[in-house]
Amino acid sequence: MRAKRVSESLNVMNELVLPNDTNTFGNLMGGRLMYWMDIAAAYCASKHCNAPVVTASVDNISFKNPIKLGHYVHIEAYVTRAFNSSMEIYLRVRGEDTLHQFTYDSNEAYLTFVALDPNDKPRSVPEVIVETEEEQKRYDGALRRRQLRLILAGKMKPNEATELKALFAE
Ligand SMILES: CC(=O)SCCNC(=O)CCNC(=O)[C@H](O)C(C)(C)COP(=O)(O)OP(=O)(O)OC[C@H]1O[C@@H](n2cnc3c(N)ncnc32)[C@H](O)[C@@H]1OP(=O)(O)O
């Protein structure tokens, strides 16, 4: 299976915040944003492995800055690392006020997707080729984040998380 560059599946999704997307403060609802993030990340994961994917987990999402009614939402999604059948996708969300010409950070998150074969069983995915310093940094951290989320999901014993433990020992 051919390893693929991060840039080959990079996805930028743009949306306009309309009245039906907002709460009573005129801000984009968190649930609507998470829905868009899931779609943006799923596209990226599916493009990396050229197979159907399902969302296995969503890491912590903190809403730093609200996105206002009438502003644009830009969701950038790229694969940080692929394991056996799973891929970690990083998302960066920004808001844009096109009238006053400024952009701002809204939030960021890591989502994990699993590729499925025609029998809906996990199947292997291509490795990731990193090309930039930022991609390398996120690639390096992916193993620790995977261990933490598998521990929290009850799928890994803490004493098996070698790289994660090493972080606390440093
Ligand atoms: C795009 C969408 O919104 S899809 C809709 C929402 N998502 C879903 O409905 C998915 C429902 N869940 C499932 O189908 C299954 O639990 C799966 C496919 C995610 C995992 O299936 P399992 O039978 O548990 O498979 P298994 O234990 O062999 O793990 C397969 C991979 O999933 C990973 N995985 C399993 N659970 C998690 C989790 N909670 N967090 C992160 N990764 C996980 C494993 O680490 C493994 O990765 P690897 O092959 O790279 O080592």
Image: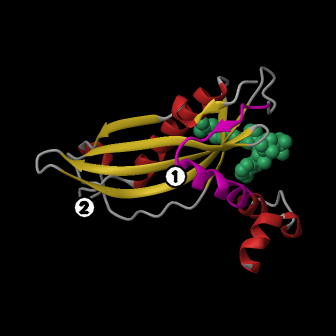
Ligand 1 shows up in which quadrant of the image? top right
Q: Residue furthest left?
A: 99
Mark 1 CB within 8 Å of ligand 1: no
Quarter of the figure with residue 151: bottom right
- The type of residue carrying mark 2 is Phe
Residue 144 within the segment the image draws in magenta: yes
| 141 horizontally vs 135: left or right | right
How far apart in space, not on screen, are marks 1 and 2 (Cα)? 35 Å
* Residue ID at (71%, 24%): 2
| 170 horizontally vs 102: left or right | right
Quarter of the figure with residue 23: bottom left
Q: Which residue is mark 1?
A: 134
Mark 1 surroundings: few (<14), some (14-19) or many (≥20) residues within 10 A: few
Residue 164 within the segment the image draws in magenta: no
Q: Which residues are magenta?
A: 124-146
What kind of element bears circle 1? Answer: helix
Mark 2 surroundings: few (<14), some (14-19) or many (≥20) residues within 10 A: few
| 32 horizontally vs 46: left or right | left
User: Which numbered tag is attached to residue 123?
Assistant: none
Q: Give whichever of 36, 45 is nearer the camera.
A: 45
Q: Is residue 132 above or below residue 168?
A: above
* Residue ID at (71%, 59%): 149
Instruction: Tell me the quarter of the image containing the C terminus.
Output: bottom right
Q: Which residue is mark 2?
A: 25
Comparing labels 1 and 2, the label whose residue is closer to the camera: 1
Quarter of the figure with residue 60: bottom right
What kind of secondary structure does the magenta stretch mostly adopt? Answer: helix
- The type of residue carrying mark 1 is Glu
